[in-house]
Amino acid sequence: AQTVTQSQPEMSVQEAETVTLSCTYDTSENNYYLFWYKQPPSRQMILVIRQEAYKQQNATENRFSVNFQKAAKSFSLKISDSQLGDTAMYFCAFMNMEYGNKLVFGAGTILRVKS
Amino acid sequence: GAVVSQHPSRVICKSGTSVKIECRSLDFQATTMFWYRQFPKQSLMLMATSNEGSKATYEQGVEKDKFLINHASLTLSTLTVTSAHPEDSSFYICSARGGGGSWVTNEKLFFGSGTQLSVL
């Protein structure tokens, strides 16, 4: 069974600083997809970044980048130049086509950006 | 970008009544829709997967008769909470997936804005 573990229930960072959120997962499959979603206080789910497991290059989206370590089954999210608007719950998620393309979410990490 | 509209955003009902939540894909055909439940400060738990024109597939532990899902068209799925009780109070979120082509470029998940259900 696929599981996703986020070991940091809460994190805080100063505005303009860098923060890294951790995520590990467990799967026996070789082909899968990993995601980071952001859920701000509005509770709208927003896709932050996506990584295909077959790609060795780490995905990057502006201030957001990931460190994908396939052998270690690790998928951390780095947020650079943190902004107040980054304050949200962040979910790591896993999807495997053989598992029906269903998203499996981690428990989430609450990130607070302080001014 | 693709939009998924979910209504209502908030509903308060009396115990024993039924509540219907709608999830619409506004500018694409959603071959599959997913329904999630989320308690405060917790993760999203998948309740069921619905494919247009077929019966929904429920996750283990989810009562099929309590949470009725209908996916009658490629743009609309509904979740009906039947005979709601206070323990059904939660935040419900739908997501929709369009189809076709490369998964990476064309097949993505889009989330509705959620429905807060409060059962008195």
Image (cartoon, grey):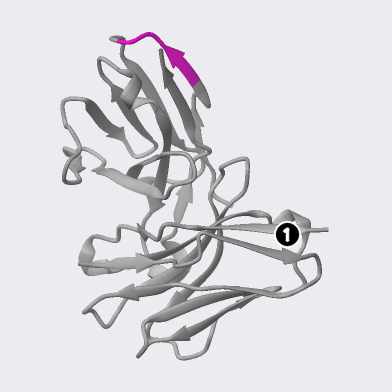
Residue at 63% x, 43% y is A41
Does residue A21 appear in this view? Answer: yes
Residue B47 left/right relative to A57: left
Query: Along the line of sight, which residue is nearer the eye, A54 or B44?
Result: B44
Image location of residue A51, percent across then percent down = 47, 76
Magenta-colored span: B11-15
Residue B38, image x, y percentages: 41, 41
Quadrant occupied by the C terminus of chain B: top left
Task: Determine whether B91 is above or below A55 in the image.
Answer: above
Q: Nearer the viewer, residue B35 or B72?
A: B35
Q: Is residue A17 left or right of residue A55?
A: right
Query: Which quadrant would residue A69 be assigned to in this image?
Result: bottom left
Residue B65 relative to residue B72: left or right: left
Q: Amino acid at mark 1?
A: Val
Instruction: Assign a secondary structure to mark 1.
Output: strand
Count of numbered marks: 1
| Residue indicated by mark 1 | A113
